[in-house]
Image (tube, helix red, strand yellow):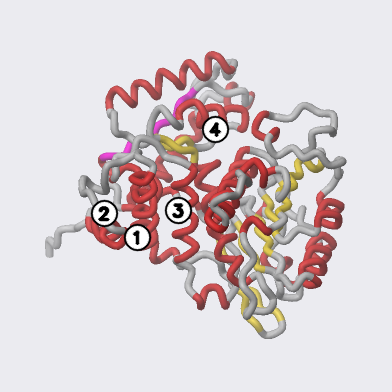
Amino acid sequence: GINGMGIPIGKLALYVAAAGFQPWRTLPITVDVGTNNEKYRNSSTYMGLKDDRPDDDEFYDVMDKAIKAIQWRWPNALIQFEDFSNAHAFGLLEKYRNKTLCFNDDIQGTAATVLAGLLAALLIQQSDPSKAPLKLYEQRIVFLGAGSAGVGVADLIAQGMAIEAKRDDPATEMDAQYFRTRNFWLVDSKGVVTKNRGDFLQAHKVRFARDDDTISDLFSTVEKVKPTILLGLAGRPAGLFTEATIKTMCKDCTESGLRPIIMALSNPTSKSECTAEQAYQWSGGRAIFASGSPFGPVTINGKIHVPGQGNNMYIFPGVGYGAVMCRSKSVTDSMFYAAAKELSLQVSREDLDNGSVYPDLRNIRDITAKIAAGVCKVAIEEGLSSGCCGRRGCDLDEMVAVLAGKMWWPQYEDYV
């Protein structure tokens, strides 16, 4: 309902702060299609529509009219979808991603942020630092949560696996779908998502459905699969990564000469799958940990561990800024992979030594410029743009400089 209006306002404030968008060229929009919440429908102070939410046909008709109106009035506008339900988030993205300049931050922005953290974590995954890092496509990944955010993250990681496999072997036929059903185990409220568990699977889960026998719970999945990466995006009450689960994963990784990569990404803290202190204590300080909620440093056996926070602010301003400044025709998965890769490169050796897989947010303008340049480069390579900021033939460093130079900064007159 209308109470969500603070979300687009806040997101646009971050576009201004992190990417230097001119504030007067942003517009927060809430499409109010009613509410099924009885509390609000019976409230005399609720400002939104008190009608029942419409069926899918009417919903998509309303959205189509809204998007066409935006395209008519601002043909070069970037549209960011935010906070749509699982039932509509994927449908809207698939319907419009090739028709207008748009993306869904809950699905794609979250995915790129997580992927960036994983790419950085791989650099310190080997217990023996003299060994070469494992490839992304060599990982076994268990997800707790198979909603729009979880599947969006898994999808981009699968795309990343395919990109890296192709880079290592141009003749490979291993595409994203190959990895979806081999490297991923998605666990929802009914257990691992499989083809034969007997329930109706939502469309976004189908491509990750495995042919295996169903495993009913997270602990049993971790025990059987022996994952190298454990990701939590369940959005349920805290504590779903239990001590037994983390200790079992850590034992299996240690026997393989690896450190477990654990990301408890649900927020706020009341929904975090585990805390940083729990992850570090239960793994004896071996875990590479990141979270969706902020946690302070933790000292284990005299060593200070600094958990990284997977904040979408690292990604969406740079993707949006790059797409707008190069006048790209659309925003592609390749752009989000490029954004994730660029973000991972901004993590310093000092950050990694402390266990953090994300860079300092105080450098967000520099990070944004580099991510935006990577997006522009992909857009040009894919034939979706003719150049960055109207310039043709710029190399990556030149793009970074041009994009940084065009960022808006607030300037206040000195009246004293």
Q: Is residue 115 visible?
A: yes
Disc 2 target residue: 407
Q: Are marks 2 and 1 in contact (CB under 8 Å)?
A: yes
Structural crowding at the residue carrying mark 3, measured as other residues with C-alpha within 10 Å and reported as few (<14), some (14–19) or many (≥20): many
Disc 4 target residue: 84
Structural crowding at the residue carrying mark 1, measured as other residues with C-alpha within 10 Å and reported as few (<14), some (14–19) or many (≥20): some
Amino acid type of the residue tagged 4 in the rendering: Phe
Magenta stretch: residue 134 in it? no
Of the numbered discs 2 and 1, the one sitting upstream in the chain is 1
User: Residue 140 sits in which quadrant?
Assistant: bottom right
Relative image position of residue 133 (x, y in whole percent): 62, 69
Of the numbered discs 3 and 1, the one sitting upstream in the chain is 3
Q: Is residue 351 left or right of residue 80?
A: right
As displayed, is residue 144 above or below residue 246? above
Give the residue displayed 64% in from the left and 44% down from the top. Answer: 150
Magenta stretch: residue 30 in it? yes
Residue at far bottom of view? 302
Amino acid type of the residue tagged 1 in the rendering: Arg
* Of residues 307 and 35, the one drawn nearer to the viewer in this rendering: 307
Q: Is residue 9 left or right of residue 128?
A: left
Mark 2: secondary structure: loop
Relative image position of residue 173 (x, y in whole percent): 61, 45
Mark 4: secondary structure: loop
**Dominant secondary structure of the residues highlighted in magenta in the image:** loop
- Closer to the observer: label 3 or label 1? 3
Q: State the extent of the magenta-drawn residues as a range.
A: 25-32
Mark 1: secondary structure: helix
Residue at far front of view? 171
Disc 1 target residue: 365
User: Residue 70 sits in which quadrant?
Assistant: top left
Distance between the Cα atoms at labels 3 and 1?
14 Å
Of the numbered discs 4 and 3, the one sitting upstream in the chain is 4
